[in-house]
Amino acid sequence: MAGGRLAATTVETVRFTRPERVGFRLVRGPVPHVVESFVLTDHEWGARLAYDGVLGTDLWGLGHHWGQLVAGRWEETVAGSPASVREEAERRARL
């Protein structure tokens, strides 16, 4: 536990399909099944980065409840990823 909270470690495989897709598949983590992807598409008004993910649980009602807890925290983490990537890219560009 970290600061009174549970901490989970995840291991995922990552597959790059150039130039537009990064896919992830959970190997080890707090739920039995996760498949995710980020897809970059060009539009006349600019580029769009889209996220898609599927989270699967087991253990019926208990698993469903755990999945909802994990999904909420995971969605917060994913939503913050583009901002942190942008900040780091801008920091490196200033060097």
Image (cartoon, rainbow, N blue to C red):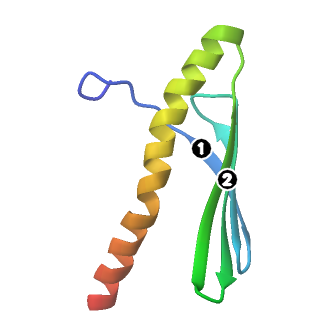
Q: Residue furthest front?
A: 45
Which amino acid type corresponds to the residue marked 2 in the rendered image? Asp
Task: Kindly identify which numbered label has been placed on residue 11.
Answer: 1
First in residue order: circle 2 vs circle 1: 1
**Residue 74 appears anywhere in the view:** yes
Residue pointed to by mark 2: 52
Above-or-below relation of 42 to 71: below
Above-or-below relation of 49 to 61: below
Q: Quadrant of the N terminus?
A: top left
Residue at position x 59%, y 69% in the image: 49
> Disc 2 to disc 1, how far (Cα)?
18 Å
Task: Give the percent coordinates (x, y) of residue 30.
Answer: 57, 28
Asked whether 26 or 81 is in front, the reply is 81
Q: Quadrant of the C terminus?
A: bottom left
Q: Which of label 2 and label 1 is nearer to you?
A: 2
Task: Give the percent coordinates (x, y) of residue 22.
Answer: 67, 65
Task: Give the percent coordinates (x, y) of residue 89.
Answer: 38, 79
Residue at position x 55%, y 26% in the image: 68
| Left or right placement of residue 10 versus residue 6 in this view | right
Question: Label 2 neighbourhood size at 10 Å, few (<14), some (14-19), many (20+)?
Answer: few
| Left or right placement of residue 35 versus residue 91 in this view | right
